[in-house]
Amino acid sequence: MEIEEKKKMAYRIGDTVLILLAALTVGEYFIGKYAPYWWAPLLTIAFLKAFFVVRDFMHIGRAFAGEEEEVH
């Protein structure tokens, strides 16, 4: 796989996660506004959002990858 293809794939994944996070935030807002006592779905959405942010935007995998495994 070429470097340009990897960049395109990374941007596509980033864009998809960004849209997913926006949709989850909108859903979280409406649940919080109209059903504030539904704490379990709100907590689940918060954990999902945190998972995607850590995995896709903080590049936590690079911190634990060896030099041979590191993807640029």
Image (cartoon, helix red, strand yellow):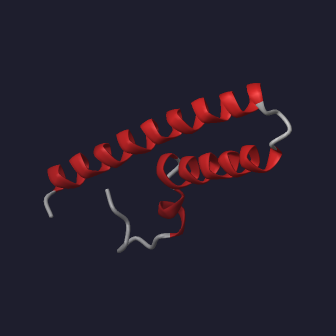
- Residue 24 location in percent, x, y? 57, 39
- Residue 27 location in percent, x, y? 61, 34
Residue 42 position by quadrant: top right
65 or 30, which is in the foreground?
30
61 or 13, which is in the foreground?
13
**Residue farthest to the right?**
37
- Residue 54 location in percent, x, y? 58, 51
Q: Residue at x 66, y 46 (%)?
A: 45
**Residue farthest to the front?**
34
From what the image shows, is residue 65 above or below residue 8?
Answer: below
- Count numbered badges in the picture: 0
Which quarter of the image is occupied by the C terminus? bottom left
From what the image shows, is residue 65 above or below residue 33?
Answer: below
Q: Residue at x 47, y 70 (%)?
A: 65
From what the image shows, is residue 69 above or below residue 6?
Answer: below
Q: Residue at x 75, y 48 (%)?
A: 43
- Residue 6 location in percent, x, y? 23, 55
Q: Residue at x 64, y 48 (%)?
A: 50
Asked if residue 7 lies left or right of residue 70, the reply is left
Which quarter of the image is occupied by the N terminus? bottom left
Asked if residue 65 lies left or right of residue 34, the reply is left
